[in-house]
Image: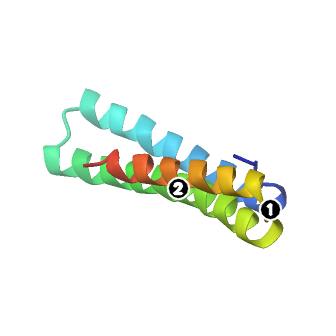
C-alpha cells in the first residue's frame, strides 16, 4: 500500500499518539484496580482510534487506485486493498 503524505500523515501520527496515550491509561487503570466497565470503555476508544487510522489508509489506497490508475497494476493494488479491508474488518469479530 502507498503511504499517506502531508497533513494526513501528521494527523494519523497524532491519532496514533493519542491512542498510545489512551492505552497507557488503560494499563494504569488496570494497575489501580479500576472498574471493568471503565477499562472496557477506554479499550473501545483505543480500538476505535486505531481502526480509524487503518480504514483511512485503506481508503487512501483505494482512492489512489480509482483516481490514478488503470490497468493491471491498479487492479492488483485494488485487490490487495480489498483483501486487507476484508481481513481488517473481521479482526474485531
Report the residue that reaches farthest toward the bottom. 67
What is the crowding at mark 2: few (fewer than 14 residues within 10 Å), some, or many (at least 20)? some
Q: Quadrant of residue 48?
A: bottom left
Q: Which residue is mark 2?
A: 82
Against 36, residue 78 (above or below) is: below
Against 47, residue 33 (above or below) is: above
**Residue 36 left/right relative to 32:** left
| Labels 1 and 2 touching (C-beta < 8 A) | no
Q: Secondary structure at mark 2?
A: helix
Q: Residue at x 52, y 55 (%)?
A: 82
Q: Residue at x 60, y 44 (%)?
A: 17
Report the residue that reaches farthest toward the left. 36
In this orientation, which residue lies closer to the viewer: 9 or 31?
9
Q: Which residue is mark 1?
A: 7
What is the crowding at mark 1: few (fewer than 14 residues within 10 Å), some, or many (at least 20)? few
Q: Earlier in the sequence, mark 1 or mark 2?
A: 1
The x and y percentages for residue 12 are: 66, 54
**Residue 66 left/right relative to 40:** right
The x and y percentages for residue 3 are: 76, 48
Determine the CA span between mark 1 and mark 2.
Answer: 25 Å
Amino acid at each position: 500500500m502507498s503511504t499517506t503524505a502531508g497533513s494526513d500523515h501528521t494527523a494519523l501520527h497524532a491519532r496514533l499518539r493519542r491512542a498510545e496515550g489512551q492505552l497507557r491509561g488503560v494499563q494504569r487503570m488496570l494497575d489501580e484496580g479500576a472498574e471493568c466497565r471503565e477499562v472496557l470503555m477506554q479499550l473501545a476508544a483505543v480500538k476505535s482510534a486505531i481502526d480509524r487510522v487503518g480504514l483511512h489508509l485503506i481508503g487512501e489506497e483505494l482512492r489512489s487506485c480509482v483516481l490514478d490508475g488503470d490497468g493491471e497494476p491498479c487492479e492488483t493494488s485494488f485487490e490487495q486493498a480489498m483483501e486487507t479491508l476484508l481481513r481488517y474488518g473481521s479482526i474485531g469479530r
